[in-house]
Amino acid sequence: MSQFPRMTVLGPVDTASTPHFDAAGIKYEIDEEYVAVVNAADAEITSPQDFPRDPLPNL
């Protein structure tokens, strides 16, 4: 199992065949249902201004 720093961008996810992304030179295949999860995680890093402020930041 690999661990990457939280600020690592995983995408883009290639959906031409089996959805996959490359990280650190390794190809990771994912189920189609998780493509949106990877894209959302990347958006959280690359576009934090597009998300609403956390209403309870101290929790």
Image (spheres, helix red, strand yellow):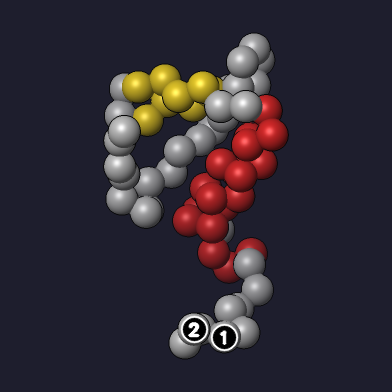
The image's mark for residue 4 is: none
As drawn, which residue projects farthest toward the front? Answer: 1
As drawn, which residue projects farthest toward the top? Answer: 17
- Disc 2 packing (10 Å; few <14; some 14–19; many ≥20): few
Amino acid on which the number 1 mark rests in the picture: Leu
In the image, residue 46 lies at what x, y percent?
Answer: 50, 54
Q: Nearer the viewer, mark 1 or mark 2?
A: 2
In the image, residue 3 lies at what x, y percent?
Answer: 30, 42
Quickly name the residue at label 1.
56
Q: Nearer the viewer, residue 4 or 31?
A: 31
Assess whether mark 2 and mark 1 are in contact (beta carbons under 8 angstroms): yes
Amino acid on which the number 2 mark rests in the picture: Leu
Q: Secondary structure at mark 1?
A: loop
Quickly name the residue at label 2.
59
Q: Which quarter of the rendering shows the N terminus?
A: top left
Give the answer, above or below, for where 59 lies relative to 36: below
Give the answer, above or below, for where 21 lies relative to 39: above
- What residue sits 37% from the left and 53% below the top? 7
Residue 30: quadrant of the picture: top right
Q: Secondary structure at mark 2?
A: loop
Left or right of 22, for residue 50: right
Give the answer, above or below, for where 3 lies relative to 54: above
- What residue sits 37% from the left and 46% below the top? 8
Counting the numbered discs, the total is 2
In the image, residue 21 lies at what x, y percent?
Answer: 49, 26
In the image, residue 31 lies at what x, y percent?
Answer: 62, 27
The residues tagged by marks 1 and 2 sit, at their Cα atoms, a distance apart of 6 Å
- Disc 1 packing (10 Å; few <14; some 14–19; many ≥20): few
